[in-house]
Image (cartoon, grey):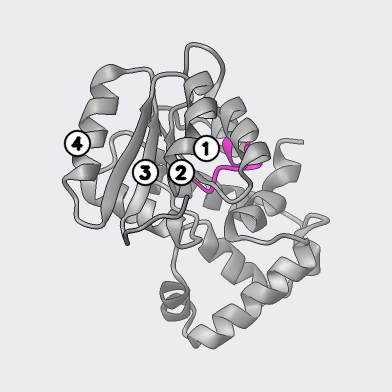
Amino acid sequence: MVKQTENIYVAIVDDDDKVRDSISWLIDSTEGFKCVGAYDSCAEAMKAVEDDLPDVVLMDIEMPDQSGIECVENLKAEYPDLKVLMLTNYSDDDRIFDSLRAGAVGYLLKNSSVTKLCESIEEAYNGGAPMSSEVAKKVLAYFHSQKKETKYTAKLSERELEVLKALTEGLTDKAIADKLFISIPTVRFHLKNIYAKLHVNSRSEAVVKAMQEKFS
């Protein structure tokens, strides 16, 4: 089955009926997006994703049958190209980094605005790593707290480290270029080098690889 429209297909995994209904409505009411599934358990998500074919899954953490973080890991094992974006009330370090390590491409808090939610879904769909500002600050605090390079980041040049830090803010290539006063092709050149040095294939993987030692 192949998608026939230009809409971004979104599915929601959340055991709260009101949350599922409201987010489904918001997504369907926004041009360019379509809600194709709303699941009240991780088990239902695992069964339905193959038929519903979402591009992006919004995942809660506290679920009745298993942790949403475990569900991300299971979904990514079955569907490696699926983009999973955490949407939760929790902002503690362990849950943030465990989610990213499990394969989530980003982490949003449920108090995010409708605009932020839709922008983040689109950003995840396009290969970005969107995060709520509170979460991004925690990730940045990790980098700023380091007194020495880790075995991963020691491989990177100073400019590559700057680009990597910008990735944690969920910035697009253009935004990174503007922030660092370099061209977009130069940003992409640095990204290519970062991916090669860290042995990863995506923005979120690069961020997670650089942070693994904090919670290992």
User: Residue 198's quadrant in the figure?
Assistant: bottom right
Identified at 38% across, 33% down, the residue is: 12
Foreground: disc 2 or disc 3: 2
Residues rendered magenta in the picture: 98-107
Residue that mark 4 sits on: 25
Q: Earlier in the sequence, mark 2 or mark 3?
A: 3
Q: Earlier in the sequence, mark 4 or mark 3?
A: 3
- CA gap between label 2 and label 4 equals 19 Å
- CA gap between label 1 and label 3 equals 13 Å
Does 25 sit left or right of 62 as displayed? left
Q: Amino acid at mark 1?
A: Glu
Q: Is residue 189 above or below residue 152?
A: below
The picture places residue 136, in percent across and down from the top left corner, at 46, 49
The picture places residue 2, in percent across and down from the top left corner, at 45, 55
Q: Amino acid at mark 4?
A: Trp
Which mark is on residue 10? 3
Q: Is residue 85 above or below residue 121?
A: above
The picture places residue 64, in percent across and down from the top left corner, at 48, 11
The picture places residue 169, in percent across and down from the top left corner, at 46, 58
